[in-house]
Image (cartoon, rainbow, N blue to C red):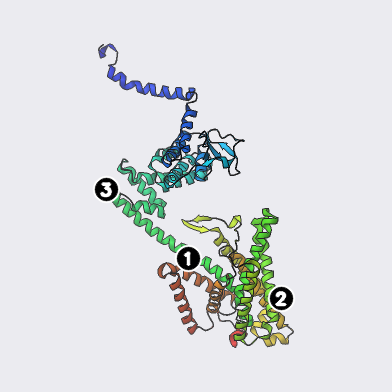
Amino acid sequence: MPSPSGGIRPMPELKRLLPRFIAPLLVLAALVLGPAPGALAQSVGDTLAKFATDRFPDTARGVEEIARSGHPTALEIVEALGENRLAYSQADRSVYVIGKDDQVRSAETGAPVADIAPNQLRRVRINNPVRSAIAAALGALRLNSADPVQRRAAAEAIMQAHDADQAPALEAALGREKDARVATAISQALAALRIVDTKQPESVRLAAIDTLAERGDREALVMLRNVPAEAPAAIRQRAERAAAAVERRLSILGGVQNVFFGLSLGSVLLLAAIGLAITFGVMGIINMAHGEMVMLGAYTTFAVQEFLRTSAPGLFDWSLLFALPLAFLVAGGVGIGIERTIIRFLYGRPLETLLATWGVSLALQQAVRTIFGSSNREVGNPAFMTGSFDLFGISLTWSRMWIVVFTIAVFAFLLFVIRYTDYGLRMRAVVQNRAMAGSVGIRTNWIDALTFGLGSGIAGIAGVALSQIDNVSPNLGQGYIIDSFMVVVFGGVGSLWGTLVAALTLGIANKLLEPLAGAVLGKILILVFIILFIQKRPRGLFAQKGRTAES
C-alpha cells in the first residue's frame, strides 16, 4: 500500500468518504431516471391485493402501505375503506372504489369501470384496529393536501391517534408549512408524540411540554397528566406545573363559558316570557296556553321548511325569514281568537281564566297531534346557524349566538312599539288607568285583543327560535311555561326591562349552579330564592303601576 506521504489516502479513509459522494449520485439518478418500469405498479398491486384477502391484519397492513406508497389514489382508497365503499371482485381479487354516485372505479388507476355493478362486488370489512389504521393514514395523507383546513384537521387527527410512526411525516410537513395556524397544529401534534418518546433528548421533551401547555385544552391536559412515571424528574415536574396551569385556565374558561350558556338560556327564557309579560301586565290574565303559542310558532317553522324542501330547495337557508312573519301571524291570530271568544267574558276572574286557558292548551296540543302526529318533527338549521366557532378558547355554537342576537332585536322592536307608536301609547294608557283611558275614547276592549295577539305573536316568534335548539313536539311549550311565569313574577309584572333582567339573571344563575348542585337541585334552589324574594318584594324587581298591580 502506498504511503500517505505519496498523496494517496489509505483505504479506510476512502471507504468512509465514498458514501458521501455515491449516495447523492444515486438519489439524483433515481430522480432523473425514475423507478424501474412497472415497479411502482407492481408494489401498489401487491398492496391492493391485501384488501382482497378478507383478513383484518392484511387490511390494516394494506392501509399502512398504501399511505406510504405516494400513489395518486391513496387518499381516495383509504377514505373509501373508512366509508364502506372499498370493494373487491371475488373472481380475480381486483379492488375497486365505489363512488357516492355508485360509479365503480379501479382502485389502482382511478379509471371508471363500466361493466361492473356495485352489487357484484364484495365490500372490504373493517374492525376497530383497521379503523385506527385508517385514522392514522388519513392524517398522514391529508397533511399533503392543498387545503389548509384539511392539513390542520390531519394534524389534529394524528395528535388524537397518538401514532408515533407519523412523526417523520409531521416533521416533513412542518418544514414546508407556510400557514401559521396549520404550523401550530403540526407543532402541537409533534409535541404530543415527543413528550412520551424516551428516545428524544430531555430538552426536546421539555419543549414539547411547553408547547402543549400553550395549547391549554383538555386534550393537552390529558397528555400532560399521562407523562410516564419513569420519565426524568425534571420532565415530570415541568409536566405537573404545566398541567396545573392548564387546569386553572380551563376552570376560568369554564366559568366564562357557563356565563355565555346562561346568557343563551336567559335569551330563550326572555323570548318565551316576554309575550306573557305583556298580556299578564296589561290584562291581568294568567294564560296557561301561552306555551302552546310557542309550539304553534315552531310547527309553523316546520311547515315552511317542508314546503321549501319540496318546492324550492334553494331557498332553504332563507326558511327562517319566511317563518318569522308567518309564525307571528298564526300565533297572533289564534291569540286574538282566544281573547275574543273566551277570555273577554272572564275578566276579573283570574281562577276561571287559568282553568279556561289550560283547557285551550290541551285542545291545541291535541289539534297539533291530529294534524302533525305525536312524534318529534325535524326542523333543520340554515347554513349560517350550523356549526360552532372558537372565541378565546371557548367553543360557541352559531345557533345559540344567533338566538341571543335575535332576542336583542325582538326586545328592541317591542320597546319601539310600546314607546313610539300610537298603539303603544294607548296600551300604556290602559295599563296606567283603564277607566280614564276609556273615558277619552280609547277602545279598551280592542286594546285587550290586540295586546293578547301581540303577546301570542311574540310567543310564536319565540317558537321559531326554539325550533333550532329543541325538539319540535306537541309538548314543546310545556317545558317553558313555568319558567316563563317565574321570569315575569321575578322581574315585575308588565315590565319589559324587569323581564329582561330576570330572564338573564335566572339563566346565568341556573348554568352556574348546574356544575355545583346538578340540574334538578339547581332549579329547586332558584325556585326557593324566588319565593323568598317575592316575600320581600311582592311586585318583583321593577314594580309596575297598573290594573294588575293595584288590584
Residue type at tag 3: Glu
Depicted 101 relative to depicted 281: above or below: above
- Res 422 label: 2
Depicted 503 relative to depicted 398: above or below: below
Q: Residue furthest right?
A: 441
Q: Is residue 425 visible?
A: no
Q: For mark 1, what is the residue?
A: 259
Depicted 514 relative to depicted 44: above or below: below
- 1 or 3: tag closer to the N-terminus: 3
The residues tagged by marks 2 and 1 sit, at their Cα atoms, a distance apart of 38 Å
The residues tagged by marks 1 and 3 sit, at their Cα atoms, a distance apart of 41 Å
Q: Secondary structure at mark 1?
A: helix
Depicted 147 relative to depicted 435: above or below: above
Nearest the camera: 193 or 503? 193
- Image quarter in which the C terminus is found: bottom right
Q: Nearer the viewer, mark 1 or mark 3?
A: 3
Q: Position of residue 67 (x, y in %)?
A: 46, 37
